[in-house]
Amino acid sequence: MANYNPKSLKAEEFINDGEILETLRYAEENKNNAELIDEILEKARPRKTEQGCVCSGLSHREASVLLACDIPEKVEKIKEIAEEIKQAFYGNRIVMFAPLYLSNYCVNGCVYCPYHMKNRDIPRKKLTQEEVRNEVIALQDMGHKRLAIEAGEDPVNNPIEYILECIKTIYSVNHKNGAIRRVNVNIAATTVENYRKLKDAGIGTYILFQETYHKESYLKLHPTGPKHDYDYHTEAMDRAMEGGIDDVGLGVLFGLEMYKYEFAGLIMHAEHLEAVHGVGPHTISVPRIKRACDIDPSVFDNSIPDDTFEKIIACIRLAVPYTGMIISTRESEEVRGRALNLGISQISGASRTSVGGYTDTERPHDTEQFDVSDQRTLDEVVRWLMECGHIPSFCTACYREGRTGDRFMALCKNGQILNCCHPNALMTLTEYLVDYASEETKKIGFKLIDEELKKIPKDKVRQIAESNINDIKNSNRRDFRF
């Protein structure tokens, strides 16, 4: 049996089954150990320094104890500290994005995904470059600036050359005042050479969900196709970083395997990236399995209720305080609203999970990867966020200024968010309000911006931000950034 080693490049050693099982036993034994839980909570709490706030984060074992804890007042304390951390490092900014599905051709046999090769009920579709362009224009007309492209794994229909061509097309489209400023990529595990090509194409974050860290379950859930190779899939982030991609995004599909096992594996993967590459994941996503064509989530008996889901989010925030967290439109407005205060820093808006879905007047369902619970327009989501006290941000400045990987984490850790990300968020929100928002949303938004400008600590930064915001309002000048 392999030994646990977070610095190893072998999947079975940095995601070690024996270590996870021992962690779960330790967590179960200590879930009512109030003294230990208080020590862990105190370690997790943000501390003020001359430079700003710092957080220690938690090990996978410490975080697993908190997840197992069922003492009501301690669970409330977990959520309180999660909110403290969220405010300390991300403030009330919520980054907006949309997924763009390029192709649902896939050669894998994943039993939880409607794109699996044996599904004869779903129409197969692959966007042409003209269709990609039209989808991008539709997204730009909503106000989106950041996309996450998605495609099934099919070396014939979706080779890396097709993905690269699509990225080039997306970046080339400038429609009215619209432009997609950052493309994140969620495609199958690939080679170091292909990751270098993605890096050269100017992608933002490379995202790959593990689905499940439990190897035996993984092999059963992925019975055929290249994704069946657990080790190759699990070691993909190391190859991506070797290929020069600074920012990677992790995630599991909660509901496939027991959530405590997945949680421990997820935090161990983050620890591994930190140990080997000096920087952990840029983002962690928390999708739950949902109904889709040919897929009934009730066949998976590990589904988790909303209160447990929210606890998972809070515990991730305590464990990896500087990592962005993403929640999608899989979740309802109510769940997303509660999750925002517990650590979520990015959400999708007006998402369509079908290939070519944005150019259709009616939401198509025949090629959806999963049911969308939150079907509001982007304007409705933006207004809702502001009414809840959040700042919807369309900012992509850090990617384009080279503040990625450890450079972004340094910015986050030294407390410069209010002097950098905060004004960038306000300027990009102003762009959205001027170019795309309804009158009601504009009224709420401009009032919020006036209030939030006062929070910028440095006078010079605040004055520049105010000047830029006035320019956006009164001219066609766009894309200011710190």
Image (spheres, rainbow, N blue to C red):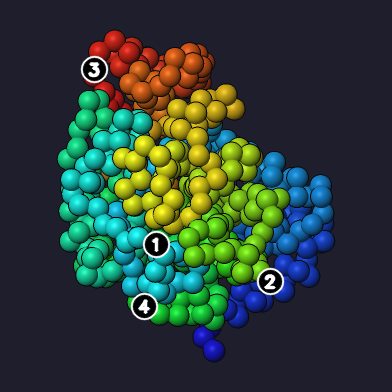
Foreground tag (1 vs 2): 1
Left or right: 127 as drawn, with respect to 80 = left
N-terminal-most mark, 2 or 3: 2
* Residue drawn 39% across the image and 69% down it: 120
Q: Are discs 2 and 3 less than 8 Å apart at CB?
A: no
Cα distance, mark 4 to mark 2? 31 Å
Foreground tag (4 vs 1): 1
Judge whether 169 appears above or below 60 on screen: above
Judge whether 63 appears above or below 19 on screen: above
- Which residue carries the number 2 mark? 24
Numbered mark located on residue 225 in the image: 4
Name the amino acid, label 4. Gly
* Residue drawn 33% across the image and 68% down it: 106
- Which residue carries the number 3 mark? 476
Numbered mark located on residue 122 in the image: 1
Q: 212 and 343: which one is in front? A: 212
Q: 4 and 146: which one is in front? A: 146
N-terminal-most mark, 4 or 2: 2
Q: Secondary structure at mark 4?
A: loop
Instruction: Assess disc 3: are there few (<14), some (14-19) or many (≥20) residues with their C-alpha within 10 Å of its C-alpha.
Output: few
**Location of residue 74 in the rendering, given as x and y in whole percent from the top left corner:** 78, 50
**Location of residue 42 in the rendering, given as x and y in whole percent from the top left corner:** 70, 49
N-terminal-most mark, 1 or 2: 2
Name the amino acid, label 3. Asn
* Residue drawn 32% across the image and 37% down it: 139
Name the amino acid, label 2. Leu
**Location of residue 361 in the rendering, given as x and y in whole percent from the top left corner:** 36, 37
